[in-house]
Image (tube, rainbow, N blue to C red):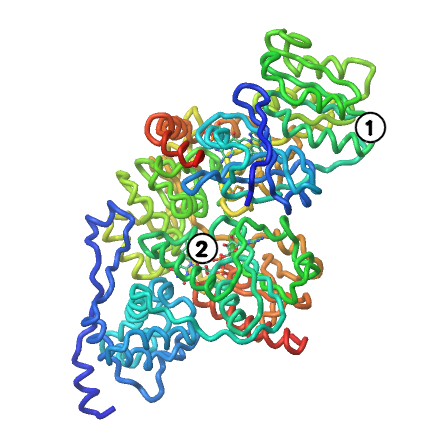
Amino acid sequence: MFTIVEKKVLSPGVFQFKVLAKKIAEKRRPGQFIILRVYDEGERIPLTIVDSAPEKGTITLIFQQVGKTTTLLGGLNEGDDILDIVGPLGKPTHIKNFGNAVVIGGGIGIAPVYPIAKGLKKAGNRVISILGARNKDILILEDEMRLVSDDIQITTDDGSYGKKGFVTQALQELIDSELKVNMVLGVGPIPMMKALCEVTRPYNINTLVSLNPIMVDGTGMCGACRISFDGKIRFVCVDGPEFDGHRVDFDELIRRNRSYFREEKAAMESLTYHEGPRCYERFES
Amino acid sequence: MEPNEIKERLKIQRHPMLEQEPKERVKNFFEVPLGYTPEVAKEEALRCIQCKKPLCVSGCPVEIDIPAFVELIAEGDFIGAARKLKEKNALPAVCGRVCPQEDQCEKMCVVGKRGKPVAIGNLERFAADYERERGEIELPQILPDTGKKVAVVGAGPSGLTVAGDLVKKGHKVTIFEALHAPGGVLMYGIPEFRLPKAIVAAEVEFLRRLGVEIVCNAVIGKTDTVDELLKDGYDAVFLGTGAGLPYFMNIPGENLVGVYSANEYLTRINLMKAYRFPEFDTPVIKGRRIAVFGGGNTAMDSARTSIRLNPEKVFIIYRRSREELPARAEEVHHGEQEGLNFKFLTNPVRFIGNKEGRLEAVECIKMKLGEPDDSGRRRPIPIPDSEFKLHIDIAVVAIGNGPNPLIPATTEGLDVNKWGNIIVDNDTGGTSKRGVFSGGDIVRGGSTVILAMGDGRRAANAIHSYLLNGKK
Ligand SMILES: Cc1cc2nc3c(=O)[nH]c(=O)nc-3n(C[C@H](O)[C@H](O)[C@H](O)COP(=O)(O)OP(=O)(O)OC[C@H]3O[C@@H](n4cnc5c(N)ncnc54)[C@H](O)[C@@H]3O)c2cc1C
Ligand SMILES: Cc1cc2nc3c(=O)[nH]c(=O)nc-3n(C[C@H](O)[C@H](O)[C@H](O)COP(=O)(O)OP(=O)(O)OC[C@H]3O[C@@H](n4cnc5c(N)ncnc54)[C@H](O)[C@@H]3O)c2cc1C
Ligand code: FES
């Protein structure tokens, strides 16, 4: 069973779990993800494998409570089991020594960036990290990122920590500096990824993004996760999740991720008003 | 049988199975046909004239001894009939429901030459249900442990058959299934109202009782590769991974919100139970006006599923004419009763969306039939300037599936054809890789449950002799 052996609150509504999943812990490589289901009536949702400890048989997941499933997940505690976990899914990041690698994480996007930064560092890159958050309180994984970065910059929207502003400004400054940027990898809200691709496009800098479409099976069977890449259909769960950001139709992805906004709201309401007590009871027993 | 008795039997008319009324059933997901009572089943079984050379058997891909099981029903030995069926067919309750009998056994039935054929499918279903509902399922004899281990990849009909056959022969069998529930298309594709999921679950439970180990959430090619399975102590591997890669039409607007592949649409509703949202968490957009593109079983299932979600109108858009519809006649008939609107000789050109990227309409073009193509069917050709717009808010693309490339891409030395289907020896199901066998949709492309099961049986026999003699 997929037992939660450690639970930490990283910031309000953001949790870190260490979960027993022996096979996945052995197999996974940076850039890959799992799909989980919390309980029998539950939805299948994808989460990045942030780290693993093969000797302990655990994987690390970090998630933000944004809707029903992540809310229920956050209600689980150490010792509880997650009903289903499948993985590792997706293609691992293509990691090699690029030279100067700039990795950018926005908000919860820092979680998927961390394993890749770690991999890039191990492969001999000079890793320059840019972390962005709305404010100081919700910045996650700063210490971990420092450990795998040669240089780190932090931006907050309100200036409560690091530089005031957005990650794109920090990226622009890096490009304008002496440093030769050999590759950029960015994960965060879709508008952020779109914006940073626009920053690097004029310089033709190899820019990778990790995409987060809605998924169902995660094995290439349904096409829910499809995006337009150079105008052609790609399935993020099997062809990705990483893509050359200069060729991705981000606007379409934003629209597709809003497919169920009405239903998602209804699901949350059902949680608080009707099903809440039942669901939480189930988890506490 | 005496000529007189034959005459008497031929007088009996075929017994249709009672069904839920169309008006009622479009409001629920319960099964449409209601089954035979024991009395009706006996009467129907009496229609069989017990031919000396039963042609029906040659029409059955797994060669069920049809006259024998039908006669057992006529005699009232329903459990005996079920056991007779199971000698050849591990999943009779499934096949009695989803097999295209009209193209198989019932097509060959001698009684059917003059009147209507014996309702073999209905009888099969009756006997299997009777046994299951009475809980009198007999565990077959399991041969002594051979010490051999077999990995079955995919828990669809082909994999389930291989597992059942090999476990009975004394091998240790583990099924690896990518999804969280076993059953393959029976679970995620074919809707509840045609094949109740409790039946699939019961069949799977039966295999577990026989000693088959089922590991869900295991994507072979990711969680483990085929080569790793062979290295980790499995003596043979069966690949029954199906044809699960949805094709799209490659027309503009296909990524608008509201355009689904049939696989996604059906998986959300069947496997994830979106029709019971928000009791179940997975949603599906309901839509007022729905169009399904395609003319096969998958299209029919998608359309008949959508009409149960209470829309205004459901269209089936098919580029050829009614005569070429590949779906089973029964399904087309059921669909028409339920109010599907067929638009034949029509092909979509592009999808049109609103500002938020949600589907609003589809532009179609009228077609006519030209010369026969490679498939022998007349090729549909567009009629110039016949474009028209149809307002819809949900589109379901059901034009077929291809093989998922995951396993071939991660398995050394496994040969596939130009479409990506695994190449096998026709007699054994053996692939180009030693110890690896395959069957079902991953070999045939989209096919049928019974052919997948037939492949499973064939491969199980070959695996058995491979394990004992080391030869394919
Ligand atoms: C490859 C991949 C890796 C991801 N890694 C992480 C991670 O490490 N940490 C993290 O917090 N989040 C991650 N996500 C996003 C996470 O899957 C969603 O936040 C989660 O599914 C929301 O579910 P919900 O029921 O709580 O919210 P909902 O109310 O269902 O949805 C809230 C938002 O999440 C998106 N979403 C809904 N359902 C899905 C779905 N099945 N798949 C993907 N997105 C969905 C919707 O677009 C919506 O904007 C990742 C997504 C992908 C595709
Ligand atoms: C909507 C629909 C309706 C149909 N209606 C009928 C009908 O009425 N009558 C009929 O006879 N036929 C029908 N068919 C066809 C029939 O269902 C298929 O021919 C049959 O299911 C094929 O069986 P299979 O064992 O080859 O594979 P599948 O049933 O496709 O099962 C394959 C299984 O393998 C799993 N899998 C795939 N890749 C991996 C992997 N890498 N690792 C682990 N597991 C994996 C899948 O998740 C799946 O569970 C229908 C098909 C569809 C889609
Ligand atoms: S999630 Fe179903 S194909 Fe990617």
Tell which of B438 and B390 is nearer to you. B438
Q: Which residue matches tag 2? A: B185
Pointer 2 residue Cβ closer than 8 Å to ligand 2:
yes
What quarter of the picture does the N terminus of chain A occupy?
Answer: top right
Q: In the drawing, does residue B14 fall left or right of residue A224? A: left
Residue A31, percent across and down? 66, 36
**In the rendered image, is residue A224 in sight?**
no
Q: Is residue A241 above or below residue B68?
A: above
Mark yes or no: residue B209 visible: yes
Q: Residue at x 60, y 10 (%)?
A: A157
Across and down, in percent, residue B421 comes to 58, 60
Amino acid marked by disc 1: Gly
Disc 1 designates what residue? A99
Q: Marks 2 and 1: same chain?
A: no
| Residue at 65% over, 63% down | B234
Q: In the displayed structure, would residue B341 be above or below residue B164?
A: above
Disc 2 residue type? Val
**Location of residue A156 in the rendering, given as x and y in whole percent from the top left corner:** 63, 11
* Residue B2 image-quadrant placement: bottom left
Question: Crowding at label 2, few (<14), some or many (≥20) Cα neighbours within 10 Å?
Answer: many
Crowd band around label 1 with a 10 angstrom C-alpha radius: few (<14), some (14–19), many (20+): some
